[in-house]
Image (cartoon, grey):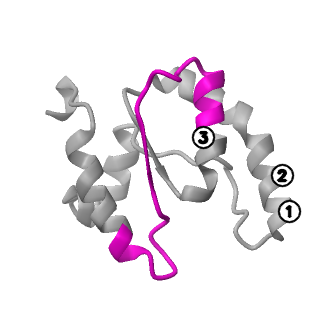
Amino acid sequence: MKDSFGGAANFLMEFKANGFFDDLVLYPVNKMEERERLEYRRKAVPSLAKRMVGYRPSAVVIVMRAIEENVVDAMGKAGLSHVPHFVTPFPSFGNQRRFKADMAKVIPKLPKTAAHV
């Protein structure tokens, strides 16, 4: 992500401070069995929707194809169905190159705001 946005040494802190970061599930689920992980993702939708209402995003980038349905559901519950969303693979397990290529296509499509121009 840092390479895609050309970030500084403290990139993650700046990224979060600018409202560019959140998780569907607010605790690690990657080591859980698939069925349990899917259930936690489903149960996390209302919480993400509530946070999204406060964020009022002008676009959403979903970094993991497997959670697209959950995030789109949260967007709908937050009244954000009209907001464009983009999906990339999670940048691990050999997907780093695909992630970087996808982000290179997504970043120019993201809406510009006064704070980020």
Q: Quadrant of residue 11?
A: bottom left
Residue 14 percent coordinates (x, y): 31, 48
Q: Amino acid at mark 2?
A: Glu
Q: Looking at the image, do the residues carrying marks 2 and 3 touch, with CB atoms under 8 Å apart?
A: no
Please check the rendered image and state whether residue 55 is part of the magenta-colored stretch, yes or no.
no
At numbered mark 2, what does the secondary structure look like: helix, strand or loop? Answer: helix
Residue with the mark numbered 2: 39
Residue 64 percent coordinates (x, y): 53, 58
Q: Horizontal placement of 10 versus 31: left or right? A: left
- Please rate how many residues cluster around mark 3, counting C-alpha atoms within 10 Å: few if below 14, some from 14 to 19, many from 20: many
Q: Amino acid at mark 3?
A: Val
Highlighted range, magenta:
72-98
- The residue located at (37%, 41%) in the rendering is 17
- Please rate how many residues cluster around mark 1, counting C-alpha atoms within 10 Å: few if below 14, some from 14 to 19, many from 20: few
At numbered mark 3, what does the secondary structure look like: helix, strand or loop? Answer: helix
Question: Real-space Cα distance between discs 3 and 1?
Answer: 18 Å
Question: Real-space Cα distance between discs 2 and 1?
Answer: 6 Å
The quadrant of the rendering that contains the N terminus is bottom left
Report how many numbered discs are placed on residues in the image.
Answer: 3
- The residue located at (78%, 56%) in the rendering is 38
Residue with the mark numbered 3: 71
Please check the rendered image and state whether residue 95 is part of the magenta-colored stretch, yes or no.
yes
Q: Looking at the image, do the residues carrying marks 2 and 1 touch, with CB atoms under 8 Å apart?
A: yes
Q: Looking at the image, do the residues carrying marks 3 and 1 touch, with CB atoms under 8 Å apart?
A: no
